[in-house]
Image (spheres, helix red, strand yellow):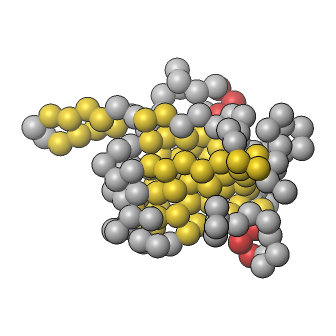
């Protein structure tokens, strides 16, 4: 069903690390670098152990703004599940090496999963453009969790 290729709207960016004697600093996002409709409204950080896979899942309205902080090596798997997209049916794999900091915005309808393929725990920041469960957590969660269905087509084995 899915073929390998580039997915419209996926533009990974290696982020600049500003380092001095005190340590380092990385700008996770800037409003002058992303379209207004994608501006984050919240942020969270997750730790993923080595060998662990998160996803696959997708959102109907939410864009995720992931920042892979470089504490381990991650593989990001993407499937364009948007029928109106010119890259519908395309799958894409990206790798973010330990020691580098990368950002990627994932638009609604693009199924995504990431795998910590490094040897230690890894950190991932997400700054989505929608609040999880809406204002005061009173709305339905915008998430289609494919990993809960054993028959889903979004597989990373044998990629």
Query: Considering only vertical position in the picture, is 37 above or below 155?
Result: above
Percent position of residue 96, x then y: 44, 49
Point out residue 115 in the picture as x, y percentages from the top left corner. Answer: 52, 64
Quarter that holds the N terminus: bottom right
Front residue of 40/158: it is 158
Can residue 34 be seen from the camera position used here? yes
Q: Nearer the viewer, residue 131 or 92?
A: 92
x and y percent of residue 121 in the render? 37, 67
Q: Is 31 on the left-hand or right-hand side of 120?
A: right
Residue closest to the far bottom: 150
Looking at the picture, tell me which residue is in the foreground, 67 or 75: 75
* Quarter location, residue 35: top right
Q: Residue furthest right?
A: 83
Q: Is residue 79 left or right of residue 32?
A: right
For the image, the number of numbered tags is 0
Lateral position of residue 31 relative to residue 20, left or right: right
Instruction: Report the residue at 64% width, 61% height from top.
Output: 159
The location of residue 29, given as percent across then percent down, is 48, 34
Task: Tell me which residue sits at (59%, 34%) in the image.
Answer: 11
């Amino acid at each position: 069903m899915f073929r390998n290729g580039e997915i419209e709207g996926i533009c990974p960016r290696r982020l600049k690390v500003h380092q001095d004697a005190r340590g380092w600093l990385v700008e996770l996002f800037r409003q002058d670098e992303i379209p207004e409709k994608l501006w984050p409204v919240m942020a969270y950080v997750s730790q993923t152990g080595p060998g662990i896979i998160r996803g696959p899942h997708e959102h109907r309205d939410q864009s995720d703004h992931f920042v892979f902080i470089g504490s381990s090596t991650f593989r990001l798997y993407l499937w364009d599940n948007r029928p109106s997209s010119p890259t519908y049916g395309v799958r894409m794999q990206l790798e973010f090496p330990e020691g580098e900091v990368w950002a990627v915005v994932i638009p609604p309808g693009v199924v995504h999963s990431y795998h910590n393929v490094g040897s230690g725990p890894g950190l991932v920041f997400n700054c989505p453009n929608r609040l999880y469960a809406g204002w005061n957590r009173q709305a339905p969660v915008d998430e289609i969790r494919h990993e809960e269905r054993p028959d889903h087509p979004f597989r990373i084995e044998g990629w």
